[in-house]
Image (cartoon, rainbow, N blue to C red):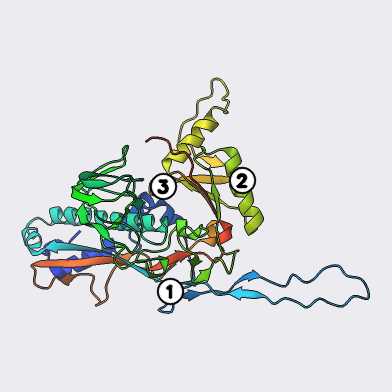
Amino acid sequence: MLPAGVGATTTTLEGAFKRNYNEGSEVLIEQQNLQAPFWSKLKVSSLKPSVQGIWSPVTMSGNEEGGAMTENEGFATPDSLNPQQPSIYSKLVTWPFQVSGQVIRLSESDKVAFAKGLDATMNDNSARMYSDVNRQSLGNGVGIITLANGAGSPSTSLVVDNALPFRRGMRIDAYATLGGAKEIDGVKITAVDYPTNTLTIPSSTWSNNAIICKKNKLAGVTSQANAKEMMGWQGICDTTTWSATFEGLSVVTNPEWKGNVIDASTSPVSQDFMQQSYNRTAIIGGIKPDTLLSNYGQARVFLNTELQKTRYEPGTVEGGNVVLKWGTMEWLVDHTYPLAELGMMSMKHIEKFQTRDVHLSNLTGNTLYQVVGFDAIGGYYAWTGNIGTWKRNAHARLINLTEPLM
């Protein structure tokens, strides 16, 4: 809240922004937990990003020439260790905002109203940015959010494979293919019908399976190598669907350098599929996953199946929240997680590499600046970093499950 008896000047605004809305504030912590469940679970690495990226040696294969032999047999020629150095490069995420000079001047006589308005504005901006980095952290590392489910020629109803990551007011592009012709250019979503996966947009024309992304996020992007958005879970736990290379290393040359991906062929999630995913990860990666993650649909299917097997003691009534678990693993649910799949993660093998947490940028020493040519004060949240792993086969994805209706 602004100091008593002082108008809403740039000086007092600067203090209010720094005190209430900068890195580590209660507002950001609260919004992080509410808006970004997966993002808040990611471990922050002690390694800091640099201009040259982050490099770490990993061993793909080694000397397998040892073994049993007779007493008069000579040694086999040893193989050499096969170390590789994957690299993780930083991405930049920003979220700009503006407060008009007129609003500031009109608020000088009502500081409480202005403080409430400032609080609502900054809560909204921080929540939306955390929601966006959370979506990116579960994505494919390219920037593709979903595909068009059918062509429009022209139409205002864009049906997509998954509408859950979208909100009214978002601006989107569509491309025929990655790096191909742009079919929809920065239109604003005016409504989202989640049960039917339909986005209402200004009249546009697009092809079936057109790539849908946020405005300008695929401009000039042809692969993960030059993507604007950060690496995400789908890209981390992948074979070659999204890229034949990962963190600069070829999957063909280093076949150990891929996630455990199991195709359910549109079957529903089951105990057997989950055990298969868990066992494959434990056998191939030598790591037992510790976290389950899915969207609401897969959690709902599994819960409905398991509740039929549960027996309750007559007369016993227990209140409170129910935590869904499988084995020792808590099942996390995130509405931005891809549909029709389930993830099994070793959280210690997924890290956030960042210079610092989401924060109000203060490159000039101030968190606010005069918008050149306009009667307005501006600022922006910023985050520099990426997420990555040094051990891809410590994770599993069970894909192409039956997705229930919303």
Q: Which residue is mark 2?
A: 276
Q: Is 175 left or right of 342, judged from the image as shown?
A: left
Q: CA distance from mark 2 to mark 3?
A: 23 Å
Task: Specify the amino acid type for callout 2.
Answer: Gln
Locate residue 315, reporting x and y percent.
Answer: 54, 20
Q: Which residue is mark 3?
A: 334
Locate residue 309, reporting x and y percent.
Answer: 58, 28
Which of the 4 quarters of the picture holds residue 125? Answer: bottom left
Observer-side mark, 2 or 3, equals 2
Q: Earlier in the sequence, mark 1 or mark 2?
A: 1
* Residue 390 numbered mark, or none: none
Q: Is residue 376 above or below residue 293?
A: below
User: Camera-side residue: 35 or 218?
Assistant: 218
Locate residue 127, reporting x and y percent.
Answer: 30, 54
* Mark 3 residue element: loop
Q: Is 334 left or right of 159, judged from the image as shown?
A: right
* Mark 2 residue element: helix
Which of the 4 quarters of the picture holds residue 310? Answer: top right
Q: Is 12 left or right of 212, judged from the image as shown?
A: left
Q: Is residue 218 above or below residue 293?
A: below
User: Camera-side residue: 85 or 316?
Assistant: 85
Q: Is residue 305 visible?
A: yes
Task: Specify the amino acid type for callout 3.
Answer: Asp
* Mark 1 residue element: loop
Q: Is residue 122 above or below residue 277?
A: below
Find the residue positioned furthest to the right: 71
Q: Which residue is mark 1?
A: 49
Q: Earlier in the sequence, mark 1 or mark 3?
A: 1
Q: CA distance from mark 1 to mark 2?
A: 36 Å
